[in-house]
Image: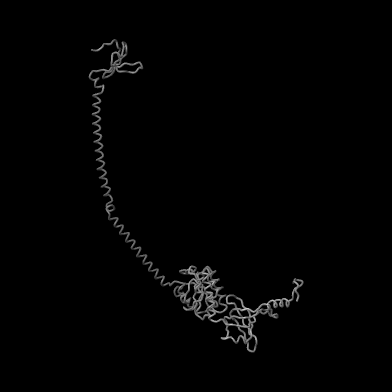
Amino acid sequence: MSAEPTSAENPWPVRTVARKIAEWINRLGSVWVEGQVTQINARPGTQTAFLTLRDPAADVSMTVTCPTGLLRGIEPPLRDGASVVVYAKPTFYLGRGTISLRATEIRAVGIGELLARIERLRRLLAAEGLFAKERKRRLPFLPKGIGLITGRASAAERDVLVNAHARWPAAPFQVVNTAVQGVQAVPQIVKALKMLDADPSVEVIVIARGGGSVEDLLPFSDETLCRAVAAARTPVVSAIGHEPDTPLLDHVADVRCSTPTDAGKRVVPDVKEETERVRQMRDRARRALHGWVDTQCRLLDQLRSRPVLADPLGPINQRADEVELHRERGRRAVLNLVSHEQAAISGARGKLTALGPAATLERGYAVVQYRDDAGNLQVLRHISEVADGTPLRVRVVDGAVHAVAKSTEPGE
């Protein structure tokens, strides 16, 4: 076998590449493989049986070969969709260039094992918080679009649509038919879920299926589907089976309905009930409005019956009379005060007149003044204050007379 590197000038022939692949695969040991059987081909008279083993959560499959006696020795007989565990060795066939598994042991997975695996997955998803109530979303009151994932022409589809349209005839549904059991169920449901979740007109997604055995409901406990539902941005309603059926999808979905019929009643309101509720609320609003108007009318009547509003000019006139009374009192008080002060002033004037020099002058007396050295007029009180020839000013009652001192004469 050539070990030289390949190139465009020195390529390997197909047989060389096939042998190298076969040598590498033949070095692999036997492995345990789990999957679902999709095709079984065991023709009478042949020594080798063929079946296809498919991954339940992905679009991946492999061909398995085994002795016909091994396949026929399994009880109960294998059927399409059965879950099995195969102990096989990978084998590469040079002639066809294909890889298959050569099985030496095939075990059908029992109900107990399936339930145990579902329980382990349940604990795992619960520990991750996928079942938490905090992450569950409320359904819209009246969704503008409802996505329905269910089997084609199934009773579940009919139950959802009939019950939803009976409650709200205009409910808009977008139905996507998929496989609801078997190896194709999970990939198709996940694809439909992503398509509806990306549609902005869809506000609720319903996944519905009728009841069935544990094996029939296995796709709805698949980890891939559960995680896809948890990652969806649109609220998801699970309506799988009947009341006793509880696949893991029921715990991950935002709303769990016991039956497809229940789902049809949960996703839309009842138009009759809503109409009656609107009528009741309208009646309540009417009664409340009438009651408020009556209350305000009574309040206005009470306000109008009060004296201040019944006779609005009465208080003003009363206050005007009081103002006039106080004004008159003030006027009289001012007049009395003025009269009293005038009398006091007159008395003071009389006293001042009696004591003033004018009264003395009227009785024939005169006031003689002279100028001092500074030129200021001074009253002459003694003869010694003037000399002969000193100018004098003699003030009488009606004026003054200027004179000159000629001589002095002492008094007695």
Side of 31 relative to 151 (left or right): right
Nearer to me, 122 or 37: 122
> How many numbered discs, if any?
0
Q: Is residue 145 visible?
A: no
Vertical order, 355 against 120 (above or below): above
Nearer to me, 378 or 401: 378
Q: Is residue 372 visible?
A: yes
Residue at image coords 29%, 53%:
309
User: x, y (%) of residue 357?
Assistant: 26, 21
User: x, y (%) of residue 283?
Assistant: 36, 67
User: x, y (%) of residue 358?
Assistant: 26, 22
User: x, y (%) of residue 65?
Assistant: 64, 83
Q: Residue furthest right?
A: 9
Model colouring: one colour
Where is the N terminus found, in terms of image quarters?
bottom right
Side of 138 relative to 86 (left or right): left
